[in-house]
Image (tube, grey):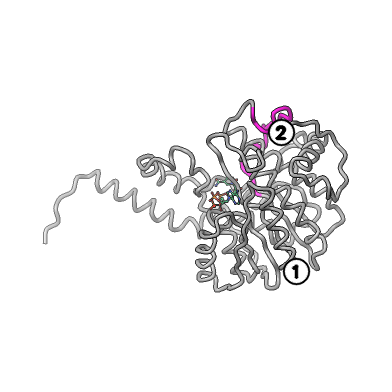
Amino acid sequence: MKLPKLPRYIWGLSAVGTAVGFYVLLKDTSGGYKYEGHEKLVGKTVVITGATSGIGKSTAEDLAIRGGRIIMACRDMEKCARVSQELIASTSNVNIYCRKLDLASLQSIREFVQSFENSESRLDILINNAGVLCKDRSVTSDGFELTLGVNFLGRFLLTNLLLNKMINNPEPSRIVNLLCFGYKDARIDFDDFNSELNFSAKNASKIATYANVLFTDSLAKKLKGSSVNVFAVNPGLAETSLRREFGSHKSYISGFLLKPLFVTLFKSARQATQTVIYCSLDSSLGAQSSGKLFCDCEEEFIGSKRYNEKISNRLWATAEVWTQLKSINMFNTNSDTNLNKT
Ligand SMILES: NC(=O)c1ccc[n+]([C@@H]2O[C@H](COP(=O)([O-])OP(=O)(O)OC[C@H]3O[C@@H](n4cnc5c(N)ncnc54)[C@H](OP(=O)(O)O)[C@@H]3O)[C@@H](O)[C@H]2O)c1
């Protein structure tokens, strides 16, 4: 049978399509940085916030394959149940559980910790993964700008409330804080910490990110001498649902046109997960690395000027007051919290 003659550009397009297809298929196994450690997690408990999609889901899968008891701390219980069943099937680990946690509600965080305390005997790894990227300003149920509330204040409270469990863990434990880009030039304006006067999506993300850099550093200093280490991770640009509120993901046409580009240029969720796994498990990371930021499985130096003690102390004290942690302050901070939240 004679095949119809196709225009040349069709052959060109088909060749490009095939090459991109191969690249995407191979990228998870061959491209980028891959954590090669073979640590097992049998008998250990891991909490992962926002484990229903993207990097959180991929992290849950990797740690479940290693035999850990995985607590998926998620706001949408239906979605969580669906994803946990998927992970149980793909990892053959039946110890994957859903627990309700909405980081946009201080009450939900406290209820999560209460139920965790009542039912779990240990906590080996806490992965503060859940995060949002908000196009327009909105607030949490406690009145915090949403990016700040979920990406920083929520995890600040969660981590502090879980600290006792980690400090008293029979084996060393770790905290991993995921954050975005923008920490190099972000500035925290304590007079408008809640972005009421000026809000931009980019700035809100940068403030929360920088707050996490300082939080990780301060927490490591406060935990010095304990068996808990804390690391910050910038997973790099990954194609996940994080940008769901933005044009390219909302519009069918731009999604159709840009998606192949994003998939090609950005990391896959699995690739972005590698540094999270590295910081959760690698034995070369000890107290000397606690408080540091990691990217592509290497320490990222962001300059000593960024670690400003005065700003760090004020940030910590502010977060303590805003999240109402102050009354159970484990570290007795006494700093300027001269802030109004309306
Ligand atoms: N993707 C990137 O390019 C990139 C770059 C740098 C840093 N990061 C960081 O990586 C982390 C994971 O992001 P991702 O890319 O995997 O995004 P993602 O696919 O959108 O996942 C975000 C997760 O956070 C959860 N979440 C959002 N708000 C929450 C809340 N109030 N309470 C509890 N969980 C909540 C989401 O739950 P639902 O499923 O219910 O929505 C989802 O499971 C984030 O901290 C992000 O800032 C990502």
Distance from disc 2 to disc 1, alpha carbons, whole Å, reads: 37 Å
Residue 324: give x, y in percent of width and height.
Answer: 77, 45
Judging depth in this view, the residue of 203 and 290 nearest the camera is 203
The answer to whether the residue labelled 2 contacts the one labelled 1, judged by CB atoms less than 8 Å apart, is no
Amino acid of disc 2: Lys
Q: Secondary structure at mark 2?
A: loop
Front of the two marks 2 and 1? 2
Report the residue marked by disc 2: 341
Magenta span includes 194: yes
Sequence order check: which comes first, mark 2 or mark 1?
1
For the magenta stretch, what is the residue range?
A: 178-196
- The residue carrying mark 1 is 121
Q: Is residue 300 left or right of residue 270?
A: right
Label 1 crowding class (10 Å Cα cut-off): few <14, some 14-19, many 20+?
A: few
Q: Amino acid at mark 1?
A: Ser
Please name the residue shown 70% across and 46% down the image.
293
Measuring 63% from the left and 43% from the top, which residue is drawn there? 141
**In the image, residue 138 above or below residue 283:** above
Local SS, label 1: loop
